[in-house]
Image: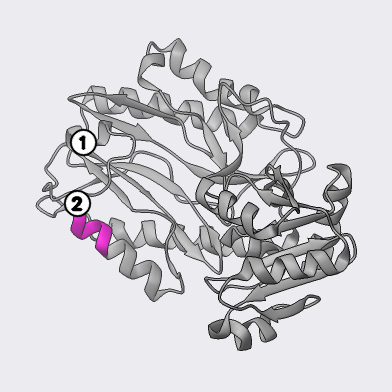
């Protein structure tokens, strides 16, 4: 698997006139090399693959990294990198401009001593946008765990419980069932706080006759899931039902019509136009979805600004919402993969309005 990824990346180096590329991003490093540790560099030249790490990880690298020359670097890894480049006669080095600080850039420039640094944007991320079968299986497992977590928490949710205690219960359940962690800080937002799109769990006590918005995911074997469901504790009012049904209509319409060849902007409009039609356009201020994979937010985006064309193998969320300050909000979210003819939905939790208590 990593061999194929290296070959695809090397082709991108040729297309971008790069003699060599240094990868420092933990996610990109793992994607290209298979290494799961917290320190190391991947260095690709036109004909060789190098993996550099320190003493702590030499045994782990020997087990995980295949198809690379593994080097235990000294105090300054950039010194070892310079030696490799000089020996190979390489005069320039591409670097991940999104993942290297200005301070590192200055220090590297001094140490490389005449080897030019060339910024390279999103090369590995471009490869990561399209998932292979092995990745999709892991993402399905992560989505299944999120679904199981939702089913579990429905038996716990009740009036009188703190949002933070619900979030903790969800975290414990996910980790007890194989997750490394949650994909992000779990959102449990009840009552008027459900109008906060990213209302991370607080000490608020869940009341009655109000929304509870749950946005969470399992970080499982290096990949994320992301699921949102909104329920009512008690009896829903007409306003609760109105908002919920509009969001549900928008989400179901998008799921029925997203297809390969569509831009992120066109996919976003599938939800946005319906919510706007009902007069709540100003209450839907975020994009319809985002790419999902090794990171919780990655390319592509489903938004009013995205001209990225959706192609088979891309995994994205579909998560329209309506947020009414002082009252509450609804978001309904699923994870999907773009297929040759449409989409496959990875998450399967029920979406009819669930009323508890």
Corner quadrant of residue 259: top right
Q: Nearer the viewer, residue 326 or 30?
A: 30
Name the chief secondary structure element in magenta. helix
Image quarter of residue 134: bottom right
Which residue is painted at 25% across and 36% down in the image? 194
Alpha carbon distance from label 2 to label 1: 10 Å
Q: In this rendering, would 10 be left or right of 173?
A: right
Q: Which residues are magenta?
A: 164-168
Q: Position of residue 212 (x, y in %)?
A: 25, 42
Residue sitting nearer the eye, 23 or 65: 23
Residue on which the image places disc 2: 163
- From the viewer's perspective, is 116 left or right of 295? right
Q: Position of residue 272 (x, y in %)?
A: 50, 20
Which residue in the structure is indicated by mark 1? 193
Nearer-N-terminus badge (2/1): 2
> In the rendering, which numbered label is found on residue 139?
none
Q: Quadrant of the N terminus?
A: bottom right
Q: Are marks 2 and 1 in contact (CB under 8 Å)?
A: yes
> Image height check: is 159 above or below 132?
above
């Amino acid at each position: 698997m990593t061999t194929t990824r290296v070959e695809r990346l090397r082709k991108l180096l040729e297309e971008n006139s790069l003699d060599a590329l240094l990868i420092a991003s933990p996610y990109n490093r793992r994607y290209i090399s298979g290494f799961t540790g917290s320190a190391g560099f991947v260095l690709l030249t036109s004909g060789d693959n190098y993996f550099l790490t320190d003493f702590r990880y030499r045994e782990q690298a020997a087990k995980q990294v295949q198809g690379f020359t593994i080097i235990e670097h000294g105090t300054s890894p950039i010194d070892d990198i310079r030696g490799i480049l000089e020996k190979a006669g390489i005069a320039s080095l591409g670097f991940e401009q999104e993942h290297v600080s200005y301070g590192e850039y200055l220090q590297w420039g001094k140490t490389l001593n005449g080897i030019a640094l060339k910024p390279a944007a999103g090369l590995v991320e471009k490869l990561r946008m399209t998932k292979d079968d092995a990745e999709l299986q892991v993402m399905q497992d992560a989505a299944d765990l999120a679904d199981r977590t939702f089913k579990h928490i429905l038996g716990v949710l009740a009036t009188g419980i703190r949002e933070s205690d619900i979030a903790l219960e969800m975290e414990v359940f996910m980790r007890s069932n194989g997750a490394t962690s949650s994909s992000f800080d779990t959102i449990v937002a009840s009552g008027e706080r459900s109008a906060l799109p990213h209302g991370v769990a607080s000490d608020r006590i869940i009341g009655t006759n109000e929304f509870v918005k749950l946005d969470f995911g399992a970080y499982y074997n290096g990949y994320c899931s992301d699921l949102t469901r909104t329920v009512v504790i008690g009896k829903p009012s007409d306003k609760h039902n109105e908002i919920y049904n509009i969001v549900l209509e928008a989400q179901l319409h998008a799921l029925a019509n997203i297809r390969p060849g569509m831009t992120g902007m066109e996919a976003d409009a599938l939800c946005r136009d319906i919510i706007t039609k009902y007069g709540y356009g100003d209450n839907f201020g975020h994009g319809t979805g985002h790419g999902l994979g090794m990171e919780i937010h990655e390319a592509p985006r489903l938004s009013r600004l995205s001209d990225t064309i959706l192609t088979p193998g891309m995994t994205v969320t579909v998560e329209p919402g309506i947020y009414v300050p002082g009252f509450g909000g609804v978001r309904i979210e699923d994870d999907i993969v773009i297929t040759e003819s449409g989409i496959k939905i990875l998450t399967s939790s029920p979406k009819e309005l669930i009323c508890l208590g």
